[in-house]
Image (cartoon, rainbow, N blue to C red):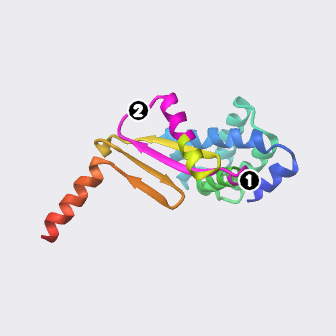
């Protein structure tokens, strides 16, 4: 909440949001970067140097740099993913967006994603922020979650239900 309020005061919410999104993507895609953050044996100075290097390379907003350094200084960097995800959620809510999560067993084209997003927008009456994930373990089908509503048509789920019925019989 603090990062959002500070970015709002400095009229830099949009820029900070884009940069936060990039950091979250890096955390999700780089095991080494994630390990760096979670490893308590890494010195604060090393963490600061790494983040300052990243900040210069990707031209981070001054507010975001100070915020990250504050987390490092207070030894709270291991909370960064949660803090940044909450920041993204607050930004989305302030724009009136509804969070949705789509998980499929195969890749979907950008056109198909846009079509799904438009259909959800029409059904829910507000903008949809769609988080798309490919998960081959579903075998087939998809899982769609919008708020507390969840639709699971995956083969994996159907197999689990059949297994449960067989055990109960």
Q: Are marks 2 and 1 in contact (CB under 8 Å)?
A: no
| Mark sitting on residue 94 | 1
The residue range painted magenta reads 93-118
Q: Quadrant of the N terminus?
A: bottom right
Q: Quadrant of residue 70?
A: bottom right
Secondary element at tag 2 = loop
- Counting residues from the start of the chain, the first of labels 2 and 1 encountered is 1
Q: State left or right for residue 27 relative to residue 19.
A: left
Q: Quadrant of the C terminus?
A: bottom left
70, 143: nearer the viewer: 143
157, 1: nearer the viewer: 157
Secondary element at tag 1 = helix
Q: State left or right for residue 148 relative to residue 43.
A: left
Taking the spot 33% from the left edge, 40% from the top edge, the residue there is: 136
C-alpha distance separating marks 2 and 1: 30 Å
Give how far across and how far down residue 7 sits, in percent: 81, 49
Q: Which residue is mark 2?
A: 107
52, 62: nearer the viewer: 62
Give how far across and how far down residue 97 sits, in percent: 66, 50
Residue 97 counted in the magenta span: yes
- Local packing at callout 1 (Cα closer than 10 Å; few below 14, some 14-19, many 20+) is few
| Mark sitting on residue 111 | none
Give how far across and how far down residue 2 sits, in percent: 77, 58
Taking the spot 60% from the left edge, 56% from the top edge, the residue there is: 82
Number of marks drawn: 2
- Local packing at callout 2 (Cα closer than 10 Å; few below 14, some 14-19, many 20+) is few
Taking the spot 51% from the left edge, 61% from the top edge, the residue there is: 148
127, 12: nearer the viewer: 127
Residue 89 counted in the magenta span: no
Give how far across and how far down residue 142 sits, in percent: 38, 45
């Amino acid at each position: 909440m603090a990062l959002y309020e500070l970015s709002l005061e400095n009229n830099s919410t949009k820029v900070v949001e884009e940069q936060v999104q990039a950091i979250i993507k890096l955390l999700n895609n780089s095991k080494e970067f994630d390990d760096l953050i979670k490893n308590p044996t890494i010195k604060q100075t090393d963490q600061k140097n790494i983040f300052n290097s990243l900040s210069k390379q990707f031209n981070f907003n001054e507010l975001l740099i100070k915020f990250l350094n504050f987390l490092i200084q207070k030894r709270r960097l291991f909370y960064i993913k949660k803090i940044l995800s909450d920041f993204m959620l607050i930004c989305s809510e302030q724009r009136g967006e509804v969070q949705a999560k789509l998980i499929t067993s195969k890749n979907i084209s950008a056109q198909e994603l846009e079509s799904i997003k438009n259909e959800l927008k029409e059904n829910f009456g507000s903008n949809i922020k769609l988080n798309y994930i490919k998960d081959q373990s579903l075998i087939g089908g998809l899982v769609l979650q919008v708020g507390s509503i969840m639709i699971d048509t995956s083969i994996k789920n159907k197999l689990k239900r059949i297994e449960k019925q067989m055990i109960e019989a």
